[in-house]
Amino acid sequence: MSGTSFTSAVNDLLEPAGFTRAGRAIWNRTAGGYRDAISLQTIQSLGTVVNIYSVDLTSEAILDSCAPDQSGGLMYPVYERLGLLMGPYDRAWRRGRDRPSDLAAAIEKYALPFLDRMHDLVQLMGYLGTGARKWREFTEVVYLAITLHRLGETEQACKLLAHPPRRLEAGGRIKVAALRDYFGCSPLYPDP
């Protein structure tokens, strides 16, 4: 890599891979029906961490068509840290200790293949399923339900959305009801 900073080393790697720099330390690409992003985040006491994001645009369009006024804030259901992909613990890169080329090499080895895996609906379903079943990550629940539906598992999608927690805000309840209607599920709250 010709760059001398983390940002320039990452830019040298990501531009040929179809990413466009969208800010000081964020790169985006839209290809094959997915929008991916990689960002560098500097944490003062820790160093630089790498965040990896992806969204399936077909699933996003389904959500937007079901609840167009309610789908804001659910941009990237896939969010991962490079250090966690490398395992077993998250890590940060520090100037003076780590070389920019090592950071770029880690992105090439771990982040780009991870994004490729997230472009497969079955792999995406597995990733989203790890946290979605407990409603802690509402975005993951919604996108897992849509992914299940797209894979022909509509009954499972309906079951997943069958019992939203009472603490779920009104916008979330609207999204859940709209998706259940789109999937053809029985209503959450049948008419009396």
Image: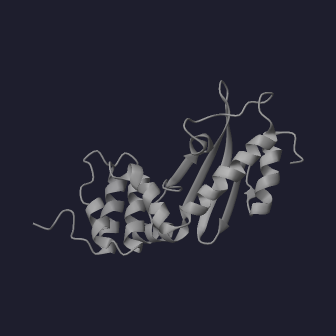
Q: Position of residue 148 (x, y in %)?
A: 38, 68
Q: Is residue 25 left or right of residue 5?
A: left
Q: Residue extending furthest top? A: 45
The residue under the point 71% across, 34% down is 93
Q: Is residue 74 left or right of residue 101?
A: left
Q: Is residue 39 left or right of residue 64?
A: right
Q: Position of residue 163 (x, y in %)?
A: 24, 55
The reply to whether residue 25 is visible in this rendering is no
Q: Is residue 93 above or below residue 80?
A: above
Colour setting: one colour
The residue under the point 48% across, 68% down is 121
Q: Is residue 97 above or below residue 157?
A: above
The residue under the point 77% across, 28% down is 97
Seen from the viewer's position, the closer of residues 18 and 171 is 18
Q: Residue extending furthest left? A: 192
The reply to whether residue 17 is visible in this rendering is yes
Q: Position of residue 14 (x, y in %)?
A: 76, 56
Q: Is residue 19 left or right of residue 129?
A: right
Q: How many numbered dots are placed on residues in this image?
A: 0
Q: Position of residue 178 (x, y in %)?
A: 33, 67
The residue under the point 44% across, 67% down is 63
Query: Quadrant of the image for the C terminus?
Result: bottom left
